[in-house]
Image (tube, rainbow, N blue to C red):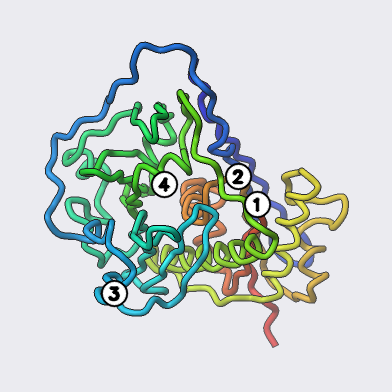
Amino acid sequence: MMRKTNIIIFSIAVIVFAGTFLISLISLPSGNEGKPSGNRNQLSNTYHSAFKVPDSGIHKLMGKNEKQILEYLGKPERIDPTKYGYNWFIYGRGSEKYLQVGIDDSTNRVTTIYALGKKLKTAPFIIGDESQKIYEKVPISDEVAFSFQNTKIDFELNEEDMMVRPLIKFGKYWAQLNFDHISDRLIGIRYMTTEVLAKQHPYSMTYQGPLPESQALSSSEWTAVNHAEDQEIFDISNVLRSRYKKKMLQWNEEAYQAAFKHSKEMETKNYFSHDSKWSGDLKTRLERENIMFQTAGENIAAKYPDAIAVSLGWLNSVDHRKNLLNSAFTELGVGSYQNYYTQDFVRPMGP
């Protein structure tokens, strides 16, 4: 029996004398929630290959080596480590050319791409198109089956998955289409190899055989990944704000400290809430970092595969979206800690 992923969304709006707080949180159970299947005769593919993969576009970077990427795209603005054995090469920060290219540590070749910018060549898809135009081009199924290293994996996409992150076979690779279901627009595309998909397994699933082992990270490696995801969430948030005609946010180091400490406390003390019996509510935590503010807000999340996935989750939740796209906020601090994420938005007090 397939166990479906449950999505839990809690939303809180609190007004206090020291300022206005807009607080929202979201938690998605880990991709490791899959279960082994019993005896089955066969896993059959339920997707189709009814469309032709274009001969040009950003997807053609898949499989290229680092030297080829540098020759084609130039030096990245930042290189971010991940917990999946590849490094993100970051391009186009703060623009509609925003792009993340994942280069595998062992093969030195591109195994995944995240295309967010509307100016990127993503044919046959056009970022910003309505979902119906996308569905007319490619068949979408709520069941996807494949094999990796003799392990059979069967994904079952729930209603939320189908609206926000449907998955299609794209030649010899995979493409996850990322939608803003509130505006009904395509906002980005993730390309990945079968190995990356098997490692992240971002959907409810059953499987036969061993799953790829997760990479064990040292404390220093986790610190580097945490900082990388902070910056990716910050960058993605600003691209989305700009797309929706909102001013980009400035980085706030004190808000980062408050956000990081909250994420770390939630993970180490095994709870999930804006309010802590150890460190207080958002107002208390911001004031502890000497932040004087007119307005503040917070989004929290846990157990998403990565920064891209959690940003998509926040955008597609009405209350989190209010924080993410709120014109009242001018600064942002993002603090990640081992799959726990906190965004603290602020508008500091004027002089």
In the image, which is nearer the foreground, mark 1 or mark 4? 4
Q: Which residue is mark 4?
A: 196
Q: CA distance from mark 4 to mark 3?
A: 22 Å
Amino acid found under the numbered disc labelled 1: Tyr
Left or right of 197? Residue 9 is right
Q: Earlier in the sequence, mark 3 or mark 2?
A: 3
Q: Please report the residue visible at 33 percent of the width from the left and 16 percent of the height from the top.
A: 42
Q: CA distance from mark 1 to mark 4?
A: 21 Å
Q: Earlier in the sequence, mark 1 or mark 4?
A: 4
Query: For residue 283, what is the image quadrant?
Result: bottom right
Left or right of 203? Residue 346 is right
Amino acid found under the numbered disc labelled 4: Val
Amino acid found under the numbered disc labelled 2: Lys
Q: Please report the residue visible at 35 percent of the width from the left and 39 percent of the height from the top.
A: 166
Q: Which residue is mark 1?
A: 340
Q: Are marks 2 and 1 in contact (CB under 8 Å)?
A: yes
In the image, which is nearer the foreground, mark 1 or mark 3? 3
Q: Which mark is residue 73?
A: 3
Q: Earlier in the sequence, mark 4 or mark 3?
A: 3
Q: Which residue is mark 2?
A: 303
